[in-house]
Image (cartoon, rainbow, N blue to C red):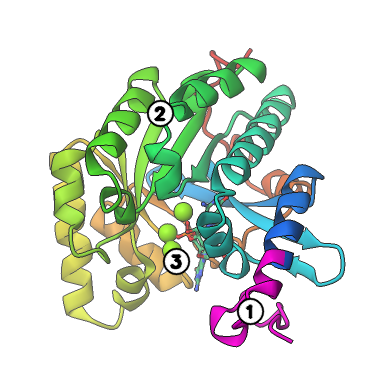
Amino acid sequence: AGRSGSSDGVAVYDDARDGSGRHRLEAVDQLRTGIGSGQLVLHYQPKLALATGEVDGVEALVRWQHPTRGLLFPDAFIDLAESAGLMSRLTSAVVDMALAQCRAWADEGCPLTVSVNVSPSNLVDEEFPDEVAQALRRHGLPAAALVLEVTESILMEDRERAVRVLSRLRATGVGVSIDDYGTGYSSLAYLAALPVTELKLDRVFVGAMTGSSRAASIVTSTLQLAHALDLTLVAEGAEDQDTVDALATLGCDVVQGYHLSRPLPPEQLWAWLQDRPPAGVRSPLADDLR
Ligand code: C2E
Ligand code: MG
Ligand code: MG
Ligand code: MG
């Protein structure tokens, strides 16, 4: 069989193991059905503002509740969605779910910005900005409630179009974050080309910073660069208190990582939020979200 188990992070479809393409068609079909029938679910990982200790927002991370194979992580199906032309549907579903959740939390008195990961194909789609604007309207949310996380691969497809689409999104007030910052060969090229509001430093640097002065120097210089450009610096992948303390000492703005919390289903995230100290949630959106 060309399909393999999932809990170990193996893809639902593996080219090398299926010469006929039959299993691929089957996997694509299941994914299309899954997207259309509510099998995608979002887990949310909180981000903490280091200056205040308040929760700054959450990142939505997609999972696929597969009918027979259990809960699948993105590395098992994102590439397939992209190559099969399903990414626009997947992203629409994710944006809609994330904004519905954002609205529900706001209604509970807990206004949180939500970050959503987008793929290269979303940003060569000229209709994407209108779609996002409509989704925000549908849920009664200001554009500032949403941050889109992009990676450098968006500049590799149709660069001019991607810049145009992203600029239009940015003009509506949606935040734009560069994810996994520092790992792409053209990281600095993004900064010149893209209208961004946030850099998200990749966890390879964050994870190494307490044990390596070279990694720590990279964090420091990225922080200086981000602040010189008036961007928020988010450190991803903080796995222990020493790292969080080091980031706070350096003046990093926001931290995210397993040490704080793993990505959680909405009801578990809600419980986690209730355990935070009083006023533990920053409310930059509070006025807009009434
Ligand atoms: P990402 O956007 O860089 O998300 C961070 C990933 O690192 C998540 O994995 C998260 O669970 C994990 N992580 C968070 N904190 C830590 C930590 O302290 N240590 C370690 N080792 N890992 C940590 P996940 O959820 O499996 O997502 C993997 C990637 O899949 C994401 O990387 C993103 O590129 C992609 N992805 C997730 N959701 C979506 C989506 O809705 N749409 C698209 N297009 N891509 C998505
Ligand atoms: Mg991300
Ligand atoms: Mg990342
Ligand atoms: Mg990553």
Residues at marks 2 and 3 touching, judged by CB atoms closer than 8 Å:
no
Residue farthest to the front, as pictured: 20
Q: Secondary structure at mark 1?
A: loop
Q: Secondary structure at mark 2?
A: loop
Mark nearer the viewer, 2 or 3? 2
CA–CA distance in space, label 1 to label 3: 39 Å
Residue at coordinates 67% horizontally, 45% vertically from top-left? 273
**Does the closest atom of ligand 1 sit within 8 Å of the Cβ of label 3?**
yes
Q: Main secondary structure of the magenta part?
A: loop
Q: What residue does disc 2 label?
A: 126
N-terminal-most mark, 1 or 3: 1
**Residue 130 percent location from the top left of the image:** 48, 20
* 7 or 286, nearer to the observer: 7
Residue 272 lies left or right of residue 46; in this view the side is right
N-terminal-most mark, 2 or 1: 1
Residue farthest to the right, as pictured: 68
* 198 or 260, nearer to the observer: 198
Mark 1 residue type: Ser
Which label number is shown at residue 93? none
**Residue 255 percent location from the top left of the image:** 42, 55
Mark 3 residue type: Gly
Location of residue 289 (image quadrant):
top right
Q: Which residues are magenta?
A: 1-25
Residue 181 lies left or right of residue 276; in this view the side is left
Q: Quadrant of ligand 3?
A: bottom left
Q: What residue does disc 1 label?
A: 20
CA–CA distance in space, label 2 to label 3: 33 Å
Which label number is shown at residue 237? 3
Residue 240 lies left or right of residue 14; in this view the side is left
- Near mark 3 (Cα within 10 A), the count class, few <14, some 14-19 or many ≥20, is many
